[in-house]
Image: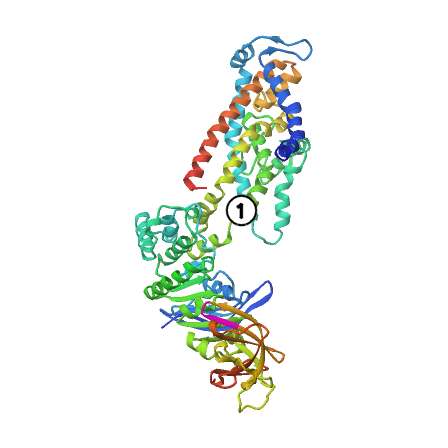
């Protein structure tokens, strides 16, 4: 049974269309990550599901119920805002109990539900504090507890980790994943962080300028990017994209300006002897990231990045032989940006 | 030099404050203990003025009137300002014009405002009573009652002064409008997702978040209430109808000082006004602080 379904959803903001015909299904118990750069319409998508933003076309169906015309409070969704949106004048317990209280749950029962929700996300010791006495990570937990105090049909998270530092982010990511397994609602998690998307998502929907570029499992998005945009957006350093008539081509391919060739930095190897074969390139910059080094090379008029062991890095200005493992390459249509063949 | 810069920059203001406000105020307070008619030199009479005030029935009436006005008008004015601010904080059609209208009466010079109401309140040809008489016969309202005698009946005249004061809430309105607009929209969106009713949102979100501002406005209006009633009482009701129905403390002081030339006596009444204000402010300040602690603001 589908937990959440968007059918041809369109939305506009200030007269400009920001979502174009979005078709998306999230199963009950599934965690879908909506990934995209800022301004892609991710938050609008979430707000349309919650009913905070009007849509100009299409339907929103939650738990088999068409909620398109219903106000936010009647959709049985819960949401964690990027800013957490905690009430500054209420204690943690009162913040979490806010939903039950305004839904006419008795005071004692609401308090008990708040205590249980807080315990589930590990902030039971904070119940009597106020938001301004909490750290960023603690606030985030309280916001989660508040969203989970009910049993929502759809659980919406708007960049919930973006205000945390890197260490907390990794930790909270793991907890969020475990928490989601227990909640069992259709979860939509919005982020611009591709690592977060790959780690958390059962599936990933890549959004660009209000259009879905690709919807697939993390493996599919990583190994079979549907478009050059997805290929470039997922992965760090970014995938190399060169024209089909450029200097680097599979040995059996003839020059074809209608194609774009893609290969990740891991598929590039460097030979210290430029004459040894492959194509000549000049090292322009080297970023060392612990064990790895990202070497940015100039090959003809193109830039190519190679991921090599830091121990084997080359000096800037050095000429090297560049070789590509084409078995791990991709071919895209240069005009549409869509992948041409299975790669 | 650095260390003295703030003091130097404050000096002109501080100088003016001391020379033009604090010193005259101190002199006036000193005059409270003298018999002074602005012509002959003041003569020290100690607590004589205060003793006379205690026995002065007109002063007692003025005191009661002022307290009554404060108790009725201060909460009412704040409520009206809050209502207007909450009505007009969203961007909707004509909201700019509506906001200007709400703030406008405060910008009208007080005397002109008073003269305007003198016409509005006229029991016979004033538009208010003409409207109230619509549909009724023999100069009565539709319910068969006599329309309010704004300027000749004691209770109606006091009501008239309150009505006048309710429309000059522009400052509080603008402050509350700004305060409401600075509240984060996401807490309201969260309330919408939880299906909170408008009343719940007002009670559990808006009111507590605006509480610090409301507390300060309450304090300020309390202090201002002693002077807000002055011009209307002077221009519209002339302190009447008898016996002294709209003679407030400020008007009492004015009459004694500048019409009866009992300057020392008026200064003593001012002293009482000041003490009352200080007491009211202290009590409210405590309440506001306690509320702020409860809400953790």
Q: Is residue B6 visible?
A: yes
Q: Position of residue A264 (x, y in %)?
A: 50, 77
Q: Quadrant of residue A170?
A: bottom left
Q: Nearer the viewer, residue A247 or A154?
A: A247
Give the secondary structure at mark 1. helix
- Residue A252: say if magenta: no
Q: Is residue A264 above or below residue B193?
A: below
Q: Nearer the viewer, residue A267 or B253?
A: A267
User: What chain letter is assigned to the residue under label 1?
Assistant: B
Relative to B24, B79 lies left or right: left
Q: Is residue B114 above or below residue A206?
A: above
Magenta highlight: main SS: strand
| Residue segment shown in magenta | A290-294
Q: Nearer the viewer, residue B188 or A142?
A: A142
Q: Quadrant of residue A16?
A: bottom right
Q: Is residue A191 above or below residue A275?
A: above
Q: Position of residue A114 (x, y in %)?
A: 33, 52
Q: Position of residue A39 (x, y in %)?
A: 55, 65
Q: Which residue is mark 1?
A: B180
């Amino acid at each position: 049974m589908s937990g959440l379904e968007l059918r041809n959803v369109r939305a506009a903001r200030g007269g400009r269309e920001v979502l174009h015909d979005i078709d998306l299904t999230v199963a009950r118990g599934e965690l879908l990550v909506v990934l995209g750069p800022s301004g892609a319409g991710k938050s609008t998508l979430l707000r349309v599901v919650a009913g905070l933003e009007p849509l100009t076309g299409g339907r929103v169906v939650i738990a088999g119920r068409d909620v398109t015309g219903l106000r936010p409070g009647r959709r049985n969704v819960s949401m964690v805002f990027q800013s957490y949106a905690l009430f500054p004048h209420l204690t943690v317990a009162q913040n979490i109990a806010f939903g039950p209280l305004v839904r006419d749950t008795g005071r004692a029962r609401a308090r008990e539900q708040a205590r249980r929700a807080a315990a589930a996300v590990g902030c039971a010791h904070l119940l009597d504090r106020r938001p301004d006495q909490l750290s960023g990570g603690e606030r985030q937990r309280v916001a989660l507890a508040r969203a989970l105090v009910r049993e929502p049909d759809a659980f919406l998270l708007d960049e919930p980790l973006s205000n945390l530092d890197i260490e907390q982010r990794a930790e909270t990511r793991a907890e969020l994943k475990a928490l989601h397994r227990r909640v069992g609602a259709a979860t939509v998690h919005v982020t611009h962080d591709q690592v977060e998307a790959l780690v958390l998502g059962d599936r990933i929907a890549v959004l660009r300028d209000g259009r879905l570029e690709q919807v697939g499992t993390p493996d599919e998005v990583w190994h079979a990017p549907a478009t050059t945009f997805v290929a470039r957006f997922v992965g760090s350093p970014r995938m190399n994209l060169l024209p089909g008539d450029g200097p680097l081509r599979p040995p059996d391919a003839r020059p074809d300006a209608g194609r774009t060739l893609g290969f990740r930095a891991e598929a590039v190897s460097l030979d210290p002897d430029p004459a040894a074969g492959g194509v000549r390139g000049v090292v322009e910059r080297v970023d060392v990231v612990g064990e790895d080094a990202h070497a940015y090379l100039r090959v003809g008029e193109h830039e190519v990045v190679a991921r090599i062991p830091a121990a084997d890095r080359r000096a800037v200005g050095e000429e090297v032989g560049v070789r590509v493992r084409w078995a791990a390459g991709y071919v895209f249509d240069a005009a549409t940006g869509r992948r041409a063949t299975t790669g | 030099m650095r260390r003295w810069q703030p003091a130097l920059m404050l000096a002109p203001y501080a100088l003016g404050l001391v020379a033009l406000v604090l010193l005259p105020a101190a002199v006036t307070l000193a005059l409270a203990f003298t018999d002074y008619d602005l012509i002959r030199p003041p003569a020290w009479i100690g607590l004589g003025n205060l003793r006379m005030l205690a026995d002065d029935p007109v002063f007692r009436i003025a005191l009661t009137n002022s307290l009554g006005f404060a108790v009725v008008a201060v909460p009412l004015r704040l409520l009206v300002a809050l209502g207007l601010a909450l009505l007009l904080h969203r961007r909707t059609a004509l909201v700019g014009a509506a906001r200007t209208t709400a703030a406008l009466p405060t910008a009208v010079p007080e005397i002109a405002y008073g003269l305007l109401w003198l016409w509005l309140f006229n029991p016979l040809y004033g538009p208010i009573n003409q409207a109230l008489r619509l549909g009724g016969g023999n100069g009565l309202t539709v319910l068969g009652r006599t329309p309010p005698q704004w300027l000749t009946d004691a209770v109606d005249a006091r009501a008239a002064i309150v009505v006048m004061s309710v429309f000059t809430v522009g400052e509080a309105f603008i402050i509350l409008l700004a305060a409401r607009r600075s509240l984060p929209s996401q807490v309201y969106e969260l309330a919408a997702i939880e299906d909170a009713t408008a009343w719940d949102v007002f009670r559990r979100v808006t009111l507590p978040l605006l509480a610090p501002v409301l507390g300060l406005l309450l304090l300020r209006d309390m202090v201002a209430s002693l002077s807000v009633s002055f011009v209307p009482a002077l221009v519209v009701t002339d302190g009447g109808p008898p016996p002294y129905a709209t003679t407030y403390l400020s008007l009492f002081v004015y009459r004694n000082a500048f019409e009866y030339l009992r300057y020392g006596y008026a200064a003593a009444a001012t002293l009482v006004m000041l003490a009352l204000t200080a007491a009211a402010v202290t009590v409210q300040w405590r309440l506001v602080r306690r509320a702020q602690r409860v809400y953790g603001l």
